[in-house]
Image (spheres, rainbow, N blue to C red):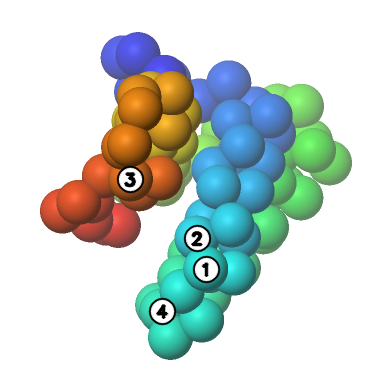
Amino acid sequence: MPDDAFRGPADVDRAREFLVEIENQQRDALEIDDVIDELRAEFEKSSDDVMYSASNDFILRLSSYLRLVDESATASRSVGASRYPRGSVLV
């Protein structure tokens, strides 16, 4: 997601799905629950109101999640690469 732009519910859902997958693999990562809840709420808001614009803080966090999604996709295409890059940090 270049230039930290909010493009609507599809971006939010993409990040949420990625984090749900991480949560399923790391059940002890309770902090991810709060992020997933926030993404669900933002997804609902942006789905219900086409004029909805997320806060700048949320857009920055969403951008970091989507970068993780993209890095993970790139890494998973590499032979022998870990599904989630080492040192990945959720903001």
Q: Are marks 4 and 2 in contact (CB under 8 Å)?
A: yes
The residue sitting at the top extreme is 2
- Mark nearest the camera among 2 and 3 is 3
Q: Are marks 2 and 1 in contact (CB under 8 Å)?
A: yes
Q: Are marks 1 and 4 in contact (CB under 8 Å)?
A: no
- State the separation of the CA atoms marked 2 and 3: 13 Å
- State the separation of the CA atoms marked 4 and 2: 9 Å
Labelled disc at residue 82 = 3
Q: Are marks 2 and 3 in contact (CB under 8 Å)?
A: no
Labelled disc at residue 29 = 4
Q: Kindly identify the amino acid type of the residue bearing the numbered disc 2.
A: Ile
The residue to which callout 1 is attached is 25
Question: Could you say which is closer to the camera, residue 25 or residue 63?
Answer: 25
Labelled disc at residue 90 = none
State whether residue 42 is above or below residue 52.
Answer: below
State whether residue 70 is above or below residue 43.
Answer: above
Q: Is residue 39 left or right of residue 5?
A: right
- Mark nearest the camera among 1 and 4 is 1
Asked which secondary structure carries label 4, the reply is loop
Q: Kindly identify the amino acid type of the residue bearing the numbered disc 1.
A: Gln
x, y percent for residue 17: 64, 48
Residue at x 58%, y 21% (from the top left corner): 7
Q: Are marks 3 and 1 in contact (CB under 8 Å)?
A: no
Asked which secondary structure carries label 2, the reply is helix
- State the separation of the CA atoms marked 3 and 4: 18 Å
Q: Kindly identify the amino acid type of the residue bearing the numbered disc 4.
A: Ala
3 or 4: tag closer to the N-terminus: 4
Q: Kindly identify the amino acid type of the residue bearing the numbered disc 3.
A: Ser
Quadrant of res 74: top left
